[in-house]
Image (cartoon, grey):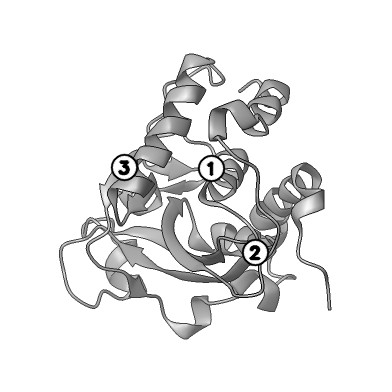
Amino acid sequence: MKSLFLICLLTSVSIFGQNVTKAAKQPNFDTITLAGGCYWCVEAVYENLNGAKSAVSGFAGGKISNPSYEDVSTGRTGFAEVVQITYDKNTTSLDEIFKVFFSVHDPTTLNRQGADVGTQYRSAIFYKNEEQKLAAQKIINALKKAKVYDSPIVTTLEPLTKFYKAEDYHQNYYANNKNQPYCQMVIQPKMEKFEKLFKDRLKKKK
């Protein structure tokens, strides 16, 4: 991946259409559901993006009702580990959500992110309407046209039929387990990259 070019591309107004608008008095919330490997990683990033009200770890895209983490971890349910992001459209935007997404995970590795392997770790955008689907396709087309990655993008666009929240111990996992080896070795580098690329878009620490 040509990282410097990716940064320039993802900050290009001409590709994404518009900048983030100034915050309005009344929030205008929307949701988008993303799969980019282990949901602990994705959740940790978006919990720190200004304008994101919440990031909830869960499952989408599968075949059974009320799946557990144990069900999904078999790789046989069709579910992906996902994070459903609720964001204020007056403070951030769907375009920015996608900018972050394609900056902090590898969209070219099929059914895996690093050492996490299986269909549950696939790269996917679960859209709830045509607007989200078109916005996702737009950024993917731009990345392909610019040949940002040496390998083909394998991110799938899948309709969101049902989102299932993961067990409570999976929520806010990084924030609650920063000393855990996986957090230090896998999540922390992603956080450092995110904080470097989007330093002006981080939530203010209380």
Give the residue pinned by disc 1.
114
The residue drawn where x is 63% and y is 63% is: 44
Query: Which residue is farthest bottom?
Result: 168
In this rendering, the count of numbered labels is 3
Q: Is residue 187 above or below residue 68?
A: above
Give the residue pinned by disc 2.
51
Question: Residue 61 location in percent, x, y?
Answer: 25, 57
Q: Are marks 2 and 3 in contact (CB under 8 Å)?
A: no
Instruction: Check disc 2 and report its element: helix, strand or loop.
Output: loop
Amino acid type of the residue that numbered disc 2 sits on in the rendered structure: Gly
Query: How many residues crowd mark 3 within 10 Å: few (<14), some (14–19), many (20+)?
Result: some
Question: Residue 5 sits in which quadrant?
Answer: top right
The residue drawn where x is 65% and y is 49% is: 20
Query: How many residues crowd mark 1 within 10 Å: few (<14), some (14–19), many (20+)?
Result: few
Give the residue pinned by disc 3.
157
Question: Residue 162 sits in which quadrant?
Answer: bottom left
Of residues 143 and 134, the one nearer the viewer is 134
Of residues 88 and 158, the one nearer the viewer is 88
Question: Residue 3 location in percent, x, y?
Answer: 69, 26
Instruction: Check disc 1 and report its element: helix, strand or loop.
Output: loop
Which is more foreground, mark 1 or mark 2?
Answer: 2
Q: Is residue 58 left or right of residue 28?
A: left
Question: Residue 184 sits in which quadrant?
Answer: bottom right
Q: Earlier in the sequence, mark 3 or mark 1?
A: 1
Which is more foreground, mark 2 or mark 3?
Answer: 2
Q: Is residue 129 above or below residue 13?
A: below
Q: Earlier in the sequence, mark 1 or mark 2?
A: 2
Which is more foreground, mark 3 or mark 1?
Answer: 3
The residue drawn where x is 51% and y is 46% is: 115
Amino acid type of the residue that numbered disc 3 sits on in the rendered structure: Leu
